[in-house]
Amino acid sequence: MRRLGAFLLALIVLASLAAPWLAPYPEDAVDPLSSLLPPSPEHWFGTDQAGRDIFSRVLYGGQTSLLIAIAVLGSSALVGVALGMTAGYAGGWLRDVIMRVTDIFLAFPALLLSVALAVVLDPTVTTVIVAIAATWWPWYARLSMSVAASVSTRPYVDAARCLGVPAPLIVVRHVLPNSLTPVLVQLSLDAGGVILTAAALSYLGLGAQDPIAEWGLMVEQGQSLISTNWWVVTFPGLAIVLTAFAFNVLGEGLRNALDPRRTVIK
Amino acid sequence: MVGYLIRRLGQALLVVAGVVTLTFVIMRLVPGDPAVAYAGPKATPEQLAAARERFGLDDPLAVQLVAYLRDLLTGDWGTSLHSRQPVLDDLALAFPASLELVGTALVIAVAVGLPVGVLAARFKTRFPDFVVRVGSMLAVSFPVFWLALAVQTIFATGLGWFPVAGEYDGDLDTASPLTLWTNITVVDALITGNWPILTSTLWHLVLPALVVAAYPAGVIAQLTRAALIEESTQDHARLARALGFRESTILTRFSLRAALNPVLALIALVFAYSIVNGFLVEAIFNWPGLGRYATTSIRSHDTPAIAGVTLLVAVVYVLANLVVDLLQGVVDPRARAR
Amino acid sequence: MIEVSDLEVRYGTHVAASVPALTVRPGECVAIVGESGSGKSSTLMALLGLAEASGNVTICGVDVLRAGPRELRRLRGSKAALVMQSPQAALPPTTRLGAFMRRALKLHGVRASMEEAMRAVLLDPALLRRYPHEISGGQAQRFAIALAIALGAEVILADEPTSALDVTVQAEVIAVLQRLRAERDLAVLMVSHDLALVSTIADRIVVMKDGQVVGTLTHPYTRQELEAVFGAQG
């Protein structure tokens, strides 16, 4: 299973990165004469209203989705882990404050908060990243907080403290390495969710705008044609399913291999 | 127990207060002047000033926040800019329909996810387990809007097995009008014995509810499986085995109840998630719920309405968590002691 | 009554323990002693057909390693009962003690008084209404013995039954076990790492190291004997 996930994902990443060479047409090559052509040897996935090649756009769309996923996960993990470590190790009022704020964010259905934020900001890819990252960091904060709290009571940390090792050094030396595995597992489990949320925001028109190839947006643009020109909606949708599936399979496999005792609720 | 209850309620209140603040802050960031949105683009400066006055837009932020809180508590959730009705009234109309959809979906999700998870745990690493694992992972990988579109196109527009959109056949409003009690159509139709509307609503519910159910069913199956497998390696499962209990008895009688706790917590989480996910499905199936209301509000920069929807969902979410916490005490005696 | 010969317990291809011969007659108490990881617990599980193993195991006339699942299920509990190391964790957390015992009795079609079984191990029958987390470790272990008594088991397999308990509570549990063994002619096979404890109660002691039997001691134990076995392994 894990290998299947890794293989699918490698395929998707490679195809997206190599889009400029693989794609038979530029992503934004408008051609009114070949509007809404069904799949054919020239256009494997057909063309959309503007006559753009959907296969090429699906490939380029992969770049957008992966970029969003990496940016969201990277920034929220960074912020979350930093806050979580501080709270978990420092304890006291600082911990209480960080925990309460985290609780409040977690008490908000993440998707709703993302939508609310995205409504406020201009519809761009950056907005999608900011809106999702803003709702995602608390999960990492809570996760690394619990790891930090449990690590900081271990005997070797006590020993280090008794030896007068400064707190920041203890965090970097002992606490951080211990939380890497759970965070890594969580990251891979979350990637699928980020892709789906990003697609939903773009579908609502709150993210990437027209000439940019984005899967959710492509579904939105084609949905009114679904009964007459099925391919416009089908292929970008399948791309989302496949990518999210690949991440989920990989994430579950990683969890089983690295962190089997944890059952993640999210 | 009482102390625990009070502490838990206090936490919930704190979270709600935080959510109110957060909502307020986000809504203050909205570009576009709510006064303009309310008074209309051709309003005179006097009309604009009156609108600003009316919404207290010239006061300091802190004052506005306190006023906002006070209004919320007294049941004044503002007036929707686009429907010109009190937001609370709008929500009272739209929310029950969402509840009906998400409630049905969750019932389906539990009814499918739980037994399927048990099945996978029972036949761990064998064929049924494989099918359940791949199936549940697929279920959580579908973008809900795309699934809604696909299901609608295939089973409603294409094959014509189910209605395309709406909550029930429109002509029933005159042929067999519904008396409203709870605003939840299914419940009202059941109470008043309005069979035409009841059957029509159930029929209309099938497709959107199945679409909304896909994600929760998938995660419930995954978690049930994981929790059961975890339980079955515990000493109590080994002792039960050594006492001659069948594997299926151990699973359903002893392990399942212990494993139900994380599953219950999960249901509270996916409940709120599904309400928001349901927004997209509602829009596609034209379901008269919060989703449609929210979408219209977003498009018309209807600040009070968006804030209302956000708050309502957050409060429902906090409540769901509270209910689950209390339920856990009923299911698992250990939780009561905590 | 337990008879074992040429037993090999495996984890996949790895041999976790091998026991060339072992007999426990009714009324006898035999202890297997060894450090943790020496394959004692797996041996115990194998005797109930709950671990992968080859060789010959006969318990109360049942050929364990060749018996079908139904026969095995009948053997487990009603003829040979297990007492585990971790007291409360070995009982289903969401089931009251009484409900669990009733279910076990029903499973094996045994009609017995639960109260009587409780009193036999010096437990208040009112505890039957409690949940596992509401009783103490010593009570939990005695309840496990009560289960065996109620089910009419002739063989008790005990996996470190006292190692999680305080010393005084240990004595109580052992006393109960000893009395019942005498009264009911039970065959007791106990696994432990506590030689001091075991040497006061066991008729014979099997010493294991790295999955191999390195010696057998018979009561009364002499200093020379002990040194011979333990000295041999350094």
Image (cartoon, rainbow, N blue to C red):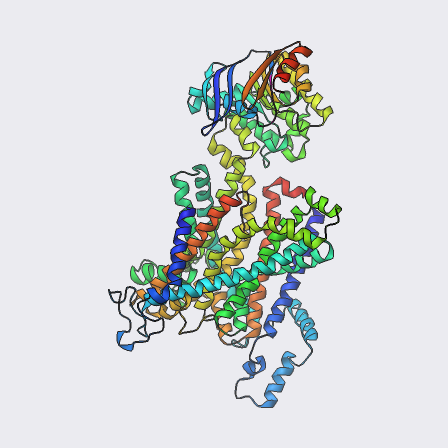
Task: Report x, y in % for residue B233.
Answer: 53, 35
Q: Would residue C32 be counted in the magenta stretch?
A: yes
Q: Against C101, is A207 above or below?
A: below
Q: Against C133, is C36 above or below?
A: above
Q: Nearer the viewer, residue A183 or C93?
A: A183
Q: Nearer the viewer, residue A229 or B249?
A: A229
Q: Is A6 situated left or right of A146 in this image?
A: left
Task: Report x, y in % for residue A264.
Answer: 54, 49
Q: Nearer the viewer, residue B98 or C139?
A: C139
> Which contiguous range is marked in magenta?
C31-36
Q: Is residue B191 visible?
A: no
Q: Is A225 situated left or right of C4 in this image?
A: left
Q: Would residue C209 be counted in the magenta stretch?
A: no
Q: Against B14, is C195 above or below?
A: above
Task: Report x, y in % for residue A131.
Answer: 54, 66
- What residue do we see at 58% from left, 69% from top? B307
